[in-house]
Amino acid sequence: MKDLLTIADLGKDGIDEIMVTADAMAEVSARPIPKVPALRGKTVASMFFEDSTRTRTSFETAAKRLSADVLNFSASSSSVNKGESLRDTVETIEAMGVDAIIVRHRSSGAPRQVAQWAKASVLNAGDGWHAHPTQALLDAYTIRDEGRDFDGLNVAIVGDISHSRVARSNIEAFSTLGANVTLVAPPTLLPPHVEALEASVSHSLDAVLPETDVLYLLRMQHERMDQALVPSLHEYHRSFGLTPDRAKQLPASALIMHPGPMNRGIEISPEVIDDSRVRVLNQVANGVTVRMAVLYLVVGSNSGGGAL
Amino acid sequence: MSTVLTGGSIAGPNGVEIADVLITGNSIVAVGTDLPIPEAARRIDASGLIIVPGLVDINASLREPGNEEAETIETGARGAALGGYTAVVAMPNTSPTIDSTSVVRDVLALAEGASCEVLPAAAMTVGRNGELLTPMGELASIGVRIFTDAGRGVQDPAMMRSIMEYATGLEAVTNGVPIVLAQHCEVDALSQHGHMHEGEWSTRLGMAGQPVIAETLMMQRDIALAELTGARIHFQHVSTAAGVEIIRRAKRDGLAISAEVAPHHFALIDEACKGYDPVFKVNPPLRTPDDVAAIKDGLSDGTIDCIATDHSPHEPHTKEFPFDHAPAGMLGFETALSVAMGELDLPLMRLVELMSIRPAEIAGISDRHGQLVAAGNRANLAVIDPEATWVADGAAMASRSQNSPFTGREMKARVMYTIVEGEITVDKGEATK
């Protein structure tokens, strides 16, 4: 595997391989000194054209646990805003000698373009509204880690599907693994041709909750109000927020997940955040584990990775 | 100076006949067999080739003045000639905008000696900003017949009404020839955040979409305003099935409107964007197979008047930006005829109407272009090898830019000769100037 751009590129076997590798990485992370020389001598560049402290930190932690050197590039300190083409930027970074490039970009498809120009491996750390494959992998790993069987699992993804790369990648990952995915949102937050996605649709969270095994809440962006997609955050919370009353309707065995950072009082009521079914911090921890697995498989396989 | 084309197949209303064509000066002096050929005449063996009236493109961006890195009038006209064009209407989306007589004169001066005739269209509003009328009367008085804000639709309905009403008063200046108002139909408020067709592919790709209704709503508005004012409107690059149907209905109702489509809109679909290559970004965007089928029907049944390239060169590096930051537009001149012949199952004469006769009428140049290959008519001709195959390559085209969406695709038919006012501007497939 040269690159990781979308879940579709992986397929079920690819996802499974990453899950199994992540188990080994979880074991590494549990050691007193959670570091192995697997990628010693490798250089990984993180190119974030859009700020994301969480994803960047997670990737960098993963790379360092595998002993890779990490090179940082951020759009604010670069010439990207001065009209340099994406290709020029990529070729500049590559000329410094890197084995992998982790790309985060506001523009959908930018990592795919980078992958066409770069000899190094490209890992998509989130592009526009398109894809965020490592998020979907860490979410799948978190569900698997709870011993849940994806076959027939009912997953409800709630919120702004239209503008969400997390939603698109999670729909692909969960449906590929055999889950039934239901998207829950007002029509204005669903993409115009939602039938193109492997999921069913509901406009009522209350109707979906009792049958839900995994409740996945998306982050609600404030700017959606300005675009007249929802009347107010208050109304959104009343209709689509996980309130204490709604939490009671959710089965006791269900999992509550969120890619973070959470808007308290919007996607989820503050009282529900400490509910025993919430797995948000497990997601964060598993993020490092899964990204270690991805880096190991992509960078290691391209040039003979060292031992764990 | 005389030229004789021998043994070519000549497309006419009654089918194809094989004959020789004798050209002297800028005119066809004789068509037939056993013609008296002057000794000094250049003889071109046209056997196996098709001779048609030179093609006319009423929608092309030549980028000069202002963006000569992407294209110049010289390179654009050369590419057009290589595509069989003898006349091209240059869009006013230049810098400065073609919105005054002085810029029109500049463009005409730059076009002198070019490989084909170049006619500037002028903007309807100053700077194409939709706020102030251009001096349309003055522009019409020096020969401008097509007005358009090229690449932008006039958003304000009151402004569009005003443009239409004003234009209907200009027939005194043009001796009764109607001024054509060519609209890029796009309601910005519905589409301005979009970069491709709003459909299943934009949803999968996570891309903001340009909905069909952004095009059709402005078409419906302009039809209503044209009914009110009596102005002569023309719809540029219609891309949707619903848009074709709107034109069909308006024509059935007796409204004098015209419409063009671009080759890429009947040869390519939105799925082409799945690799995020900005070479497939164009405005209006590539649509769906259903839209392609409707456009082909419209070309066949007369709903659509003509094929125009919407030739839009962009410097190579700008197509290396992310898809949503890259400019929209595609090269069109050198592939239009081949794409039309390859994709459309139309009689040759219908193609000639679509690519020469009708666009010449719309541009008001039927006195010299879009004339049948017959004695007494102007020698503006294209000579085509219908059996030739070649592979399109944007980098090898005459344009200063390379953004052909057909690069790598096998093309059918090739222009071997283009003759402009009796002068050979393409000779055996090569530009002469």
Image: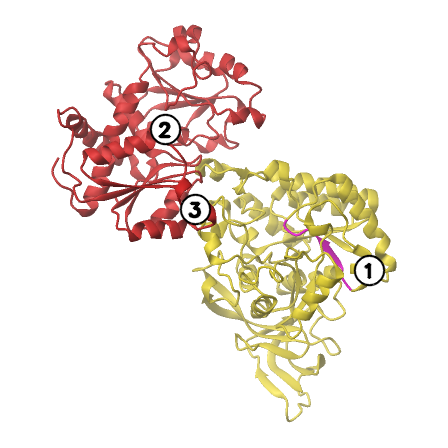
Residue B384: say if magenta. no
Task: Please give the letter of the chain rendered in yellow.
Answer: B
**Mark 3 near mark 1, Cβ–Cβ under 8 Å?**
no
Query: The disc labelled 3 sits on which kind of residue?
Result: Val
Image mark 3: chain: A
Rounded to the nearest angstrom, the CA distance separating label 3 from label 2 is 30 Å
Residue A307, horizontal then vertical, whole percent: 11, 38
**Mark 2 near mark 1, Cβ–Cβ under 8 Å?**
no
Q: Describe residue B234's horizontal placement relative to residue A68 as left or right.
A: right
Q: Secondary structure at mark 2?
A: helix
Check the image and report above or below for B7 versus B39. above
Q: What label sits on residue A170 in the rendered view?
A: 2
Residue B149: say if magenta. yes
Q: Quadrant of the N terminus of chain B?
A: bottom right
**Magenta-colored segment: predominant secondary structure:** loop
Check the image and report above or below for B376 versus A53. below
Q: Quadrant of the C terminus of chain B?
A: bottom right
Looking at the rendered image, the disc whose residue lies closer to the viewer, 3 or 2, is 3
The region drawn magenta spans B143-151
The 10 Å Cα crowd at callout 1, few under 14, some 14 to 19, many 20 or more, is few
Check the image and report above or below for B268 versus A24. below
Q: From the image, tell me which residue sits under label 3.
A: A80
Q: From the image, tell me which residue sits under label 1.
A: B177
Q: Colour of chain A?
A: red
**Nearest to the observer: residue B230 or residue A300:** A300
